[in-house]
Structures are given as C-alpha cells and as structure tokens.
Image: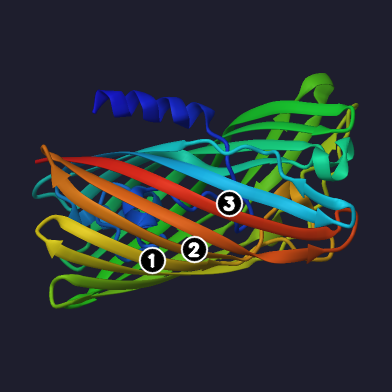
Amino acid sequence: MKRLLSVTISMLLTSTTAYAGGFELPNQSASALGVSNAFVATADDASAVLYNPSGLAWQPGLSVQLGIVTPYRDSSVKLAGGTGPNMGTEAMVGSIYAGWAPIDSAWVVGFGFSSLYQLNNEWSQAFGAAAGTTKLTVDHASLDAVYAVNSTLAVGLGGDWYLTRADLTQGANAFKGHDWASFGGHASLKWKFMPAWSAGLMLRSGSKISMSGAANDQLSFKLPDQVSAGIAHDFADVWRVEVDGKWTRWSSLKNFNVTGLSPQTNTLSLKDTFSVMTGLTWTWRPNTQLRFGYAYDQGANKAAGFNPVVADQDGHQASLGLGGDFTGLHFDLAYSYTYYTKRTATGAFAGTYRDRRQAFALSVSKYFD
C-alpha cells in the first residue's frame, strides 16, 4: 500500500496526457472506467468524490482509494504529402480519493486529488515549427460536504482548486508559466427514488485560469462548466445497468493566445459537447464484480478552423473491468479501447486526423469502520 501511494503521488506531479471531448481526462478510477465512466448514479466507492460526492453518504466509516491509469495513443494527420505523427507522448496519471462518513451522523466529508485536464500535442513533423508544442496540465483538488437527508436522498456542495502548468512553443516564441490559485465549485445529488433504482446529478462550474511567463507574457483561458446525470437499475440483486449523459461547455474556451513580448496565436473553434455512457455490472460472487461499458464522446473541435492544439474527435469507447477483495483490500482493474472517427479539417491545419487510444487502470481501496 505504501509503495502504491508513493508511485501514485509521483505520477500526480508529473503526468501529461489528453483525451477526446476537448482535453478533459474522463478516466479517473478503475471501477468507473470498467463501465466506461457510467458511474454518476452508482458512485459506490471513494472515487465518488469526483463523479458524484453524494454517493459517499452510503459508504459508512473511512474509505480511501489510490489509483493509476496508463494510457497508450496512436495519433496522426494525413496530408497531401504523406502522414505526420503527433509526437506528444502519453504518461501514467494517478489519483487519491477519501471519504469519511461518521457512524450515526448525517454529514459526510470527501477529498480528492487528480489530474482533471491535460494536453500534450506536438505536430512539428506535420506542419513544421509554426504548429508548435502544447503541454498543459490542470491538477484538481476538491473538498466536499455531503448531507444525507434520509436513507434515500443525499445532497452535497464542494469546492474545486485548480493547479495549472503550461509550456507552449510556436516558432521561436516560448511560454512557460503556472497558476496555483484558480477556484470553482460543484453541487451533487444521489437519490434512491424507488427500490433497485438510483439517480445521480453533478454540476461543476468552470474556472478562469491566468498565468504569467517571462517578460510579463500572459496566458488566460476558461475551463468549461459541466453537467452530468445518470440513472441506474438493479436486476435480481446481481446485475446493474446504468446510463449517463454529460454536457460540457467547451464553447467558452476561445483561444490559448499568449500576449506580451513573445506572443503566440492559438485561436480555437470549439463547440459544446454531449457524451453518453452506458455500463453493466455483474456481481457474480460476494464483493466480486465484472464490468462492461460503452461510451460515445463527442469531439469539441469544429471541422472549419480545426486547431490541433486541441486535437480531439468523436470517440467510441468499449471497456471491461474486474473488481474483488484480496488480503483486506479491494482491487479494481479495467481496460478500454477508444476508436475515433476520422476528422477532415479545413483551414491552416487542413488534413484528415486519425486517433486511437487504449487505457489500463488499477485502483486499490481500503475501508475502515
């Protein structure tokens, strides 16, 4: 457990990657990834802190989870003169979640830390130095207070703290900066409105990120607002089906422009996105689950004015997972493969973009009475 903790912390500090749907990292725990992140209405382990903190109300005592996700990516663009690869590299990401629900109390506290948004794109072999390199990491810490209204309904409020690092190059100009003081908020609900049925809702506000580099160069951008909702149903005490939807306001992000003595122009043409996730969980023996999932993730980039700084496309994700107890700990494993439909873009970065991704996830949970 101590070894996993040290590995997880090191990955939290160094990881860089990106996914479809703008540049959000949707895969935040193995239990959720196993059902393609259809987890808002389930939220039954410590990673509920990120997906739906109100789910902590049904987890008595202290619950702690450490997790890692290892992604693999194959991304390129087909041009008239050949194919240019995206040289941005993938790396493991880590997470820490904890929830405390005191016995005989209606109040619950939750805490989480993970990388929530990331970019790592480098298209110099396709478009030359003018395309530049984009490295962006937005780590996220959250603190939640959840109130169990009764045995079927819980609501929560929480704060978000964003810690951002950026490293952008374009031609001879380079920018490197950080922002340690951007904040947002979120609200959550979980409702078991009928026997064997549950619903979940998560609302998260965006945040304004601003940072300075050398010679007073400035970079400012907006993280998007988000709404997630889901409904789950149990069958025969061993099957659970969940369907979720998530709306993300990517249209609020207009550019990654750097202003000052070393300016960079990165105009974006993004649209709001809607994702659909479905998951099936089979509890085939006590405390042991098999999971299957499918998700459709809409890309935010428009074909006209496509900017590979945010190289996302419409994606179809299939996943499977396994969870079980061993030596006093609960382990979850998951694997996903995401196929992205080709995107033919026009404008300065015209071409046909192709992307494939895989992810392996491991989470280890411990429950204390």
Work out which quarter of the rendered image holds the C terminus and state it: top left
Residue 88 % position (x, y) = 67, 39
Circles 2 and 3: CB atoms closer than 8 Å: no
Residue underneath mark 3: 19
Residue type at mark 1?
Answer: Gly
Residue at the extreme front of the image, as rendered: 82
- Residue pictured at 36% horizontal, 62% vertical: 35
Q: Residues within 10 Å of mark 3 (few under 14, many from 20)?
A: many
Residue type at mark 3?
Answer: Tyr
- Residue pictured at 79% horizontal, 53% vertical: 307
Residue type at mark 2?
Answer: Gln
Residue in the foreground of this view, choosing between 250 and 360 = 360
Q: Which mark is residue 293?
A: 1
Residue 352 % position (x, y) = 78, 61
Q: Is residue 12 above or below residue 102?
A: above
Q: Quadrant of residue 120?
A: top right
Q: Quadrant of residue 238?
A: bottom left
Circles 3 and 1: CB atoms closer than 8 Å: no
Circles 1 and 2: CB atoms closer than 8 Å: yes
